[in-house]
Amino acid sequence: MTFSFIRPELNNLQAYTPHPGGAGVNSVETEIDRLDTNESPYDLPIALKQELAQTWLESIESNRYPDGGHLSLKAEIASYVTQSAAGNPHILPSQITVGNGSDELIRSILIATCVGGAGSILVAEPTFSMFGILAQSLGVPVIRADRSPIDMSLNLDAAKMGIRDRSDVPVRVVFMVHPNSPTGNAMIKEEVDWLRSLPRSVLVVIDEAYFEYSKMTMVGELVNHPNWIVLRTFSKALRLAAHRVGYAVGDPGLIAILEQIRLPYNLSSMSIAATHLALKHRKSLLATVAETIAERDKLFTTLSNVPNLKVWRSDANFIYARIEGVENPDAAMAELVSRLKNQGTLIRHTGGGLRISIGSPAENERTGLRIIFSMDLGEVSGQLTFES
Ligand SMILES: *Cc1c(COP(=O)(O)O)cnc(C)c1O
């Protein structure tokens, strides 16, 4: 059934698949290693859940709308952001807006800049798929520049050409993820220099979803670049993916526009309370980051020794790899993902490669062994046929 009242471009929209590995596995009862969405492997400690439940019992009126102004939340986030950057650049609450995940903020940015034929966006493929999906859902053209297969940095010539060639629908926004998903690399100096050189007529969005792992941030440069905006999230290292909270940091005037177009009650009262809690206990919550980084480097070493698997260094909580030296790498990777799924490990086949989230030490060890085992089966299957 097609509906003639639906905008034609939505007919071939490829939506985001929340858990591609399997529907119904998103549950604590199933023994599945969920290494496909880059969440922290650790739930909130039970004492913090109890504190949150207590807040719900005592201070949240379910019949009342949430605090739609987010004033105290923005003040706390501003102070966290200030502390997070070298030199502690003084970030004001007026420089913060919060969203129902940073996904909502990406959509707000597109609404504010590009809809109605006002502009197009530029992304560096492979990258976070939501930029393209949200743009397409709003009828915003997407220009894709490629990355170097060596270090996965942006092909600057392609990016410059992409911007120059669009006089009909000018590029209004450049999205860069730092460090990038799915490839795991932080921006290099040449990329940052290019962002610095862009005219004020282009909004630069730097998505720092993995900041707590990379500890690299561009927040300190916002004061020199009113056309830059930094996105962050509570969904990854701060362990609140269930609560859907992200934030943007930028020039107060730009943030005021995003505040105007957001939905009035975009965060639930529980999400607001959970965010206050996470910020208050951030030191203990972030204590798992060091373990994740050590585990990532261990898994990197394991996977680097697997024949036909090329693995890239990562500054985030996941590893990107590709199968090489086989006849049909994409089919081989699809086959590997399916073999892993049969053994109980979910990973993501995206951006022409494999993205493996770092889980608990036990999950990572199992995953390493399962990958070695599944790749060893190569010759038998006909799919993973290696050139020998
Ligand atoms: C996970 C992720 C986000 C976070 O999205 P939320 O909507 O805040 O959960 C944003 N950007 C990138 C690149 C991500 O990988």
Image: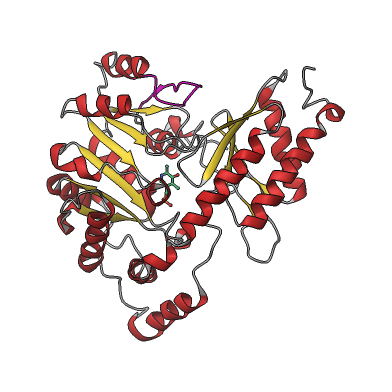
Q: Is residue 122 left or right of residue 10?
A: left
- Can you see residue 69? no
Toward which corner of the image does residue 234 lie, by quadrant?
bottom left
Question: Which one is in front, 46 or 10?
Answer: 46
Q: Eyeballing the image, is 197 above or below 211?
A: above
Residue nearest the observer in this picture, 329 or 387: 387
Q: Is residue 26 above or below residue 305?
A: below
Q: Is residue 350 visible?
A: yes
Q: Check residue 24 for magenta coloring.
A: no
Q: Position of residue 135 (x, y in %)?
A: 37, 35
Residue 224 on image: x %, y %? 14, 38
Residue drawn where x is 47% and y is 56% of the image: 289
Residue 152 inside the magenta-drawn segment: yes
Quadrant housing residue 326: top right
Q: Which residues are magenta?
A: 141-155
Q: Nearer the viewer, residue 38 or 193?
A: 193
Main secondary structure type of the part rendered in magenta: loop
